[in-house]
Image: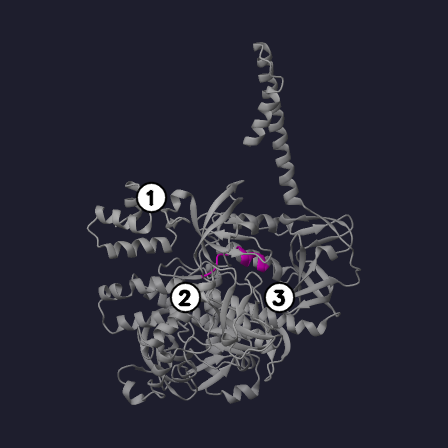
Amino acid sequence: MDYIKLIRDNQLIYLNFETICKEIKKLTNLSIKDIKTEVQQLIDDGTLFVDDRGRISISRDRGYIKARLTLNKKGFGFASVEGRPDLFIPSYAINGAFDGDDVLAEITNMRTETDIEAKIVKVIKRNTTHLVGTFVEGKNKNVVFPDDVKLPQVRIYKNDARGAHNNDKVYVEINPSSLDSKTLTGRVVEVLGQANTMKAEQLSIIRSYKLKDEFEKQTINETKNIEKFVDYSKYKKSRADYTSHNAFTIDGEDARDFDDAISLTRNANGVVLYVHIADVSHYVKENSALDKEAYRRGTSVYFPNHVIPMLPKELSNGICSLNENEYRLTLTVKMELDKAYNVKNSAIVESVIKSKHRMTYTEITKIFEGDTLVIEKYADLYKDILTMRDIANKFKADRLKQGEIRFNLPEPFILENAAGEIVTIEKRVQDEAHELIESFMVKANEIVAKWAGNLPFVYRVHEKPDSEKVLRLSELLTNLGVANNLKLNGDQPAAYQQIVDKIAGTPKEKILSYLILRTMMKARYAPTCLGHFGLALTHYCHFTSPIRRYPDLLIHRIIKSVLAGTPKAEVKAHFTDTVERASIQASDTEKIADEAERAVDDYKKAVYMQKFLGEEFDGIISGVQEFGIFVELDNGIEGMIKTDYLPLDEYIYDEDKMTIYGKSHHYTIGDSVRVVVSNVNTLARQIDFDLAGVEKPLKNFIVNKNKANKNAWDKKENSKNLLKNKKIATKIGKKIKKSGKKSKNSAKDFYKSKRKRK
C-alpha cells in the first residue's frame, strides 16, 4: 500500500493522527491497527511531518529534506543528502540537533547549485546514545564534559555515577527522555581511568566509536561448547588430507591468530601451490549467537598494543588458528602451475592440515638474504621457499603487466614495550617476505571470485575514479611538473602506474603518491562483481581472512554449501538477501574500524612527540591549505605550521598548484623544510610545527588566489548587470518623462526593485 500516494491523492493533510488513520481506514480494507503502525513508522522516519499543533503533512511536499547532520567544532554543520550536494547549516539553524542525527532540513538560501544554506526543522532520529568524556564532581551536581566538543555536557546524578571520581574518563549512556530537553542527563556505564593517562585516553577513543571488547553472554556460552582440538580421525577421509605437506604460516612476530598457511608439491608438469585458509564456518554456524555477533562486529580492529577481535579468542587464537603442529580444518585453494608458473587449473576443497612451522617475515627475509643459521633451521622448507619466491615474483609481474597500481608508501609503526610505553615510531617497509604472502592471497582471492560465477557472493570492489577527481589530479600533476596521460573516464590503471614509476625515487614520491591515492574510490564490499581498479582485476573478493573479516566467513559458508551438493537455485534463494545486507554492514564496520585505528595512532603519535618539544627535524611539505602547511617527518608523523607563523609576508594561496607564496617566500607540496616541534595537544591529537630559525610574526596577510579569481569574475558580472540595469532604468525614465507622469523617482525605484529581486 502506497500511503503517501493515498494521502496526497485524497488531500488527507493537516489532520491529526487519529483522524488521518480513520480516513485511510474508510478508503482501504486494512485494519486500523495496521494503519496506525504504518502511519507512525512514516512519521518516525521523517516521511510524514507533524507540526506543533499535531497536524500531519507530507515532508517532501513542504520542501523538507531527509538528511544526516555532521557538525563542525565551530558550531555550524552540513546535512548530507544522498545524490545531491551537502546543505550548509549555520550554527543558529541547528535547532537542538546533535552531530550524526537524522534530520529534516529546509532550504533557506540557494546561492548556486552547490552552495545551499538550510535550517534543521526536526530531528527524526537521535543517533547519539552514548558518549565519552571527563567526569567532574560538583557540590550540587556531577557533570561529564564530552571529548567531542560538538556535544553538550551531561548531568550525572549521584546514583548514576558508578563510582566515578573527579577527572575520570567515563563512558556514558544518555537518558533518552532528556535528549529533547535543555539539560542532558545520563548514567556512567564504564569508568575508563584517570584522564590524560595512556590507557584511559586510548579506551576513550575506542569507546567513542562504540567498539566493545566483551562478547555477549550467549556468544560466550556457545563458545564453551566448541571443541578445543581437531579429532584427525574424524576428518581424514571426508576431507582432502594435506597433513603430510610441509605447510607453514608466515606472519609478524606479534601475531596471535593465523588465518592462512601455504604448501607446495611437485609433479612432472610443474608444481602445485596450496593456500590453506582456516575453516571458521565449520564452528561459526549460520544464525548462531557467534554468527550474529561476528556480523555486527564485521571485522577485528587492531591497535598498537590491543586487538578487538571479531570472534572470541577461543576461536581466533585457538581452534580456528592454524597453530604450529596442531591439526586444523581448512578450505584450500589448489593451484596447478606449469613450469613457467602459469595457473593451468584450480580447485577449492575442504581439507585438514597440520602446520609444520610458524615462520615470521623476518625469518623469510633472512633466508632470502642467505642467512645460514635460519636456512639450517628451516632446511626442510628451504627449497620450497625459494620456489615460492619465484612463483610470487611471477604473480607480481603478471599483475603489473595487467596494470596493477603499486604505491611505495611505508606506514608508521608504533613500537611499545610491555608496560604500554611508546619506545619509537618508525616506518614499516613492505619487504619481499610480505609480498610473497600477499601475492598468494591475491591470487587465491581472484580464483575464488571467478569460481563464484552467478552465485550470490560478497565481492571486494574498487571502482574507477570519478572523472572530476581525475581531471583535478591531472591538472595538479601538470602544475607540479609531472607529465601524465590520465583519461577522464579513469578506466586505465596502467596510466596511474606510469606516473608512480615516474616519481619513484624523487623527493616528492610519497606526497604525490598520496595525492594519487586520494583520487581513487574507496574499496568496499558489494554483492555485484564490479572489479578491482587498483589491482587491475575483473574478479576479486576477500576469502583469506575469515577469522577477522565477516565477508570471508560468509563466502566460506556459500562455497561449502555448493561443495556439499546444494542445488544452485537453493543457494541463490538462501543467500541473495544475506550477501546484500552483509556487503553494506561489512563496508560500514570496516570504515569505523579504520577511523578508530587512525584516531588511536594519531593520539599515540602526539604523545610520542611531546618529548621532542623544542627539537628540530627535517620534513617534507605534505599538504598546503589556506590556514596552514602540513609537514611530514621521516618517521611518517605529520604536523602543521599555521600560515600566521610563516615568515612575515603578503601570501597568496594557490589551491591549483598546492602552493602558498609571497614576495620573498614560496612553499609548495613536496618541498623539504626544517621544522621545530612547537606545541602538542594530545586530546585533540594535533602536532604543531614552526619553521626552524624563523621568528613568529604577529600576523600574515593571506589571499586565496582561487577565491580571488572567482570574486573578480563575480565582480565583473555584477558590473555588467549594474550597467545593464542602469540603461534599462534610464530608458524607462525617458518613457515616463514623455508620458508626462510626475514621478521623478520612477527610474530609481525600478533599479532598486531589480536589485532586491536579484
Q: Which residues are magenta?
A: 513-523
Q: Secondary structure at mark 2?
A: helix
Checking the image for residue 13, the label placed there is 1
Left or right: where does residue 588 sit relative to residue 425? Answer: left
- Three-letter amino acid code of the residue under disc 3: Ala
Q: Residue at x 26, y 54 (%)?
A: 35
Instruction: From the top left corner, tell me how far across and down residue 178 is, in percent.
Output: 47, 63
* In the displayed structure image, the side of residue 391 where residue 455 appears, left or right: left
What secondary structure prevails in the magenta region? Answer: helix
Which numbered disc, 3 or 1, marks the residue that appears first in the sequence? Answer: 1
Numbered badge on residue 586: 2
Residue 19 on the magenta segment:
no
Q: Report which residue position mark 3 lands on.
A: 684
Q: Residue at x 63, y 71 (%)?
A: 605
Name the residue at 49% across, 87% down: 378
The three-letter code of the residue at mark 2 reads Ala
